Image (spheres, helix red, strand yellow):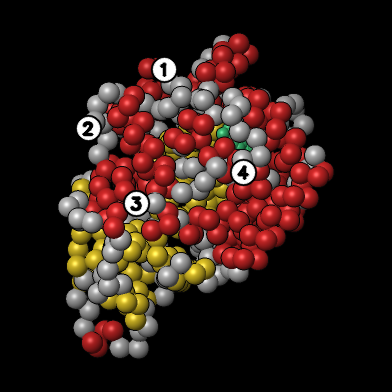
Amino acid sequence: MIIKRGHYLQVEDGVWSVQKGDILIEGNVVKKLGEVTEREAAGHEVFDAAGMLVLPGLVNGHQHTPMSLLRCYSDDLPLMDWLNKKMLPAEMKMTSEDRYKGAMLSLAEMIKSGTTTYADMYIDMDTIAEAVASSGMRGALARGMIAMDANYSDRIEESRQLVKRWNGAANGRITTMIAPHSPYMCPPDFLKAAVELAKELNVPLHTHLAETADERQMIQDKYGSSPVQYLQEAGFFEDTHVVLAHGVHFTAEDLEVLQQVKRGGIIHNPVSNAKLGCGTSDLLALRRHGIAVGLGTDGPGSASTLDLFMEMKAAAWMQKLLHSDASALSSHDILTMATKTGAEILGLGNDIGTIEEGKKADLIMINMNQPHFIPAHEPTSLLVYAAAGQDVDSVIIDGEVVMKHRELLTMDEEKVMFEAQQSAASLLNRL
Ligand SMILES: CSC[C@H]1O[C@@H](n2cnc3c(O)ncnc32)[C@H](O)[C@@H]1O
Ligand SMILES: [Zn+2]
């Protein structure tokens, strides 16, 4: 395929700039950028991108796809009540079919708002992997593991099987991770077993960390340490690759520990953290310590939408509010978090996250010919402060067009919505 007559965004040293030129895609790779000769273009399908700005696909570093069935089912509660009294009991009643329908709904919503790669943590991951494979999405999938006692070998085994079956599947679109849920849902031996498994299989660890003040207190009372120290004691930061969701409540000592992380980083979920009353991460402190920060939505049960454009705005606003400083994080920093850094944190930085020759063709096109994008003084500012997911016109993942002019090509959108609605209604009847 050749994308013609458009403009595309590239980043150098953290600064994004608009380039004019064609994008030649061969197979799943960006083969050439700029001037493509008639000869090179011969035989390629032409995608007319006049009026479009092409960006690298967005990376959602933390999600729980089937929870779309629980969107706005129970809001305005603090995290521990929301999780223990509402989400976990409802999730116990979900069937495999429900989880598939919920995952498909999430995948449709993510593609329609410009996400091309995401990280999922849930149970029944074979079912979710099937949904990801058929949707055309790129996914880093993990079996979310909760254990309250020493009886956890089945979850470790399921995680091992997920990695064996799915790592590198769907033409490499699917990768896998090992996901002990959180410090407060994982006793020490279980955490250690998860760390050992991740090392043995050479895949990243993915967990929730330091999301609430309650979590800090619980871990302090139980183990006499902070959540970060607790993970450290289990070997979490010893030559591992870690994807740490949230990171709202860190001490100065925690930041010193996290500074040692060489692979991975924090996934910031500003909307979920605000809505559940958790607080917001101090991203400037994380950056001062050289800790990589990407963006996520968390599940639709808390965030309510899966629109990373919303998260970009929220991330920018919250840092400016937190520090009473309008210069706290620029639109360029925020766009980098949602693309390049997110990809690096998921271990995919060599393949995706920027538009470069030789990288995978994961691209989104924004229709810039709309009133809220005029005048086009600063495209990066427009994307972060003025754009919304609905502005995404077309999406290419792994060289395949999965949405064209807002029509999903890998799934029947009406059917996906109808079936998810049916599943959600039937689930509510069973509660
Ligand atoms: C065992 S699968 C994953 C598990 O995580 C739960 N979950 C969703 N959002 C959050 C959050 O913000 N903090 C902690 N746990 C969360 C979800 O309900 C699943 O059970
Ligand atoms: Zn989560």
Q: Earlier in the sequence, mark 2 or mark 3?
A: 2
Q: Is residue 289 visible?
A: no
Dot label at residue 327: 2
Query: Where does the image place residue 304, in percent across and percent down from the top left?
Result: 55, 42
Dot label at residue 251: 1
The answer to whether 332 is drawn above or below residue 104 in the figure is above
Which quadrant holds residue 332? top left
**Quadrant containing the N terminus in the rendered view:** bottom left
Give the total number of marks visible in the rendering.
Answer: 4
Q: Is residue 411 left or right of residue 22?
A: right
Dot label at residue 64: none
Q: Which residue is mark 4?
A: 71
The response on whether ligand 1 sits within 8 Å of label 2 is no
Per the image, label 3 sits on a secondary structure element best described as: loop
Q: Earlier in the sequence, mark 4 or mark 2?
A: 4
Mark 1, other Cα within 10 Å: few <14 / some 14–19 / many ≥20: few
Mark 4, other Cα within 10 Å: few <14 / some 14–19 / many ≥20: some
Please, what is the three-letter code of the amino acid marked with disc 4? Arg
Q: Please report the residue visible at 24 percent of the width from the left and 26 percent of the height from the top.
A: 325
Real-space Cα separation, disc 4 to disc 2, in angstroms: 34 Å
Q: Nearer the viewer, residue 372 or 61?
A: 372
Q: Earlier in the sequence, mark 3 or mark 4?
A: 4
Mark 2, other Cα within 10 Å: few <14 / some 14–19 / many ≥20: few
Mark 3, other Cα within 10 Å: few <14 / some 14–19 / many ≥20: many
Q: Please report the residue visible at 27 percent of the width from the left and 50 percent of the height from the top.
A: 382
Q: Which residue is mark 3?
A: 387
Query: Where does the image place residue 271, in percent across and percent down from the top left?
Result: 47, 36
Given the current orientation, which residue lies at the most extreme front position?
A: 371
Q: Is residue 150 visible?
A: yes
Please, what is the three-letter code of the amino acid marked with disc 3? Ala
